[in-house]
Image: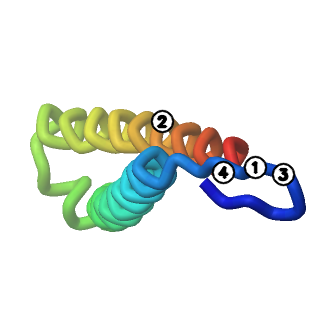
Amino acid sequence: MINIDKVKLCIDYEITKDKYKENQKSEESLKYYQDFLAFINRKLYNRSFIEGAPEKVIEIERKKKRDTKEKIDNILETINKYQNEK
């Protein structure tokens, strides 16, 4: 607790620290999934991969792309939530 000119300010350090850690983890996850999405896109835009791969493999890669985009959106939502709480 900090006293500043008759005003008491109480900061819950543990909650602030935990929020910081969670936000940091979210940003690390975001970077991972953005890199993973770039990797998937390189595959899907590679003509020789598309021409040589079985349709089932291509569909799996497209599903990975959709799932990864969804994860990125969820992480961005979480990061925005943390930033709005500041």
Decide: marks 3, 1 in contact (CB < 8 A)? yes
Q: Return the x and y of residue 64 as percentages of the image width and height.
A: 27, 40
Disc 3 packing (10 Å; few <14; some 14–19; many ≥20): few
Which residue is more in the foreground, 74 or 14?
14
Residue 77 % position (x, y): 57, 38
Provide the secondary structure element on which disc 2 rests. Answer: helix
Q: Could you tell which of marks 1 and 4 lies nearer the N-terminus?
A: 1
Amino acid identity at mark 1:
Lys
Residue that badge 3 annotates: 7
On the image, the x and y values in percent for residue 71 come to 39, 39
Asked whether disc 4 touches disc 3, contact meaning CB atoms under 8 Å apart, the reply is no
Give the distance between the C-alpha atoms of the residues marked 3 and 1, in whole angstroms.
4 Å
Instruction: Give the distance between the C-alpha atoms of the residues marked 2 and 1, in whole angstroms.
Output: 37 Å
Give the residue type at disc 4.
Answer: Gln
- Considering the numbered disc 3 on the image, is that residue within a helix, a strand or a loop? strand
Mark 3: which amino acid? Val
Q: Which callout, 2 or 3, points at the residue further toward the start of the chain?
A: 3
Task: Using the numbered discs, state the Cα–Cα distance from disc 4 to disc 3 in whole angstroms.
Answer: 26 Å
- Find the distance from the CA under tag 4 to the CA under tag 2: 14 Å
Q: Amino acid at mark 2?
A: Asn
Judge the density around disc 4: few (<14), some (14-19), many (≥20) Cα neighbours within 10 Å: few
- Res 83 label: 4
Q: Mark 4 or mark 3, which is nearer to you?
A: 3
Q: CA distance from mark 2 to mark 3?
A: 39 Å
Query: Tag on residue 74?
Result: 2
* Residue at numbered disc 1: 8
